[in-house]
Image (cartoon, rainbow, N blue to C red):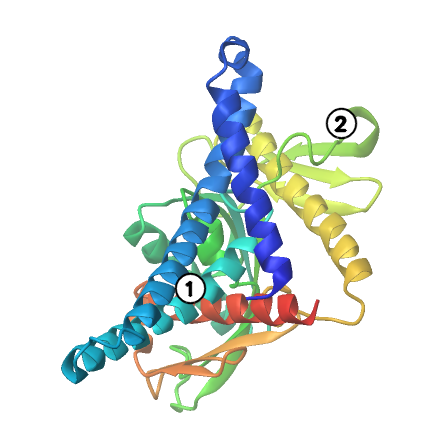
Amino acid sequence: MSTTFLRKFDTMRRRHAELNALLGQSSTQNDAAEYARLSKEYADLDPLVEAWMEYLGLETEIRDTEAMLDDPESDPEMKRMVREELDQLKTRLDEKIPELQLLLAPKDPHEGRNVILEIRAGTGGDEAALFAADLLRMYGRFAEQNRWRLEPMSSSPTQLGGFKEVIAMISGKGAWSAFKFESGVHRVQRVPTTEAGGRIHTSACTVAVLPEADEVEVTINERDDLRIDVFRSSGPGGQSVNTTDSAVRITHLPTGMTVTCQDEKSQHKNKAQALKVLKARLLDIEQRAAHDERSKDRRDQVGSGDRSERIRTYNFPQNRVTDHRVNLTLHKLDQVMEGDLREMVTTLTAHHQAELLARMGEE
């Protein structure tokens, strides 16, 4: 391991010990805000220090084991056993290094956030809209399997049961980590239900995954920045949905961005939902601009969230799904459409971590 890594972990170990001492002082314990801040910093350092101490422990074991090989009184059989143990210890040490490097990698600033999921029908007309509904169902099943909550926020249904656009919030621990690689163009190849000749058609949907914005991250002056229109909801609805001005359209005047929510019966709830979506989109624009400025010469293929990029193909006749970013092909599309995205998410996460390690090696 490089000297730079050694210094970083040693500095963290000393800070961890310092925080432990500070948390034990009565002056800190009597200051609730300071105690909470230091406790969080201490908890964040815990896994790093634990992994570092395990690494140092393995180094000590290796030195002690190597010393046993130099013992002139050891018989050949004992030395053979010691060499085997030494090989195992060195393997464990080698495996520990990438883990330590990942612990030092920059943390995702959106970790722990709720997800705002936007699915839009693209090329393919009615078939694309039907596939948008299929994707929403797939993500809903995936969320259900992980005990996350998927809450529809806005939708534009079609007469055949599809969606021109649908927006939902997914909330729960770990939701962002699992969904953040879903942004992009999802292409489907299948025989549409409306196709009498049995020909395979290719359609596409665009998926956008945005983190829910904190109040302090996006400031909106409702009086000067927003135009809010209310109108009657269109399409299928329950009691009173289509008979009152409950639908809300918010236009962000500085950018011209428009968000419409009409799924709730309450105008107040629709306005709150629309504001959440608007803030998430504004945060996304701001962070993309900052990312582009920092990364003019470098592009993260998995984490870019580039919604113009085709990321995945769903081939129904061959029961095949392919993620083009990591060249992963699974012949279990039926299971994937039922929400079994575990292998896909695991592979994308591992690829992203490998890229992080490669970048750290370049620095």
- Residue pointed to by mark 1: 96
Query: In the image, residue 171 lies at what x, y percent?
Result: 44, 42
User: In the depicted view, which residue is nearer to us: 16 or 124?
Assistant: 16
SS for dot 1: helix
Query: In the image, residue 42 lies at what x, y percent?
Result: 49, 33
Tell me: residue 94, above or below residue 288: below
User: In the depicted view, which residue is nearer to us: 308 or 193?
Assistant: 308
Q: Badge 1, how many Cα within 10 Å: few under 14, some, many 20+? A: some
Q: Which residue is drawn at the image coordinates 52% and 66% (left, top)?
A: 353
Tell me: residue 234, above or below residue 91: above
Query: In the image, residue 70 lies at what x, y percent?
Result: 32, 75
In terms of image quadrants, where is residue 229? top right
Q: Is residue 153 left or right of residue 83?
A: right
> Of the residues shown, which amino acid type is indicated by label 1?
Lys
Q: Is residue 230 visible?
A: yes
Tell me: residue 231, above or below residue 127: above
> Of the residues shown, which amino acid type is indicated by label 2?
Glu
Disc 1 vs disc 2: which is toward the camera? 1
User: In the depicted view, which residue is nearer to us: 189 or 237?
Assistant: 189
Q: Is residue 160 visible?
A: no
Q: Quadrant of the C terminus?
A: bottom right
Instruction: Residue 222: give its label.
Output: 2
Total numbered labels: 2
Mark toward the start of the polypeptide (1 vs 2) = 1
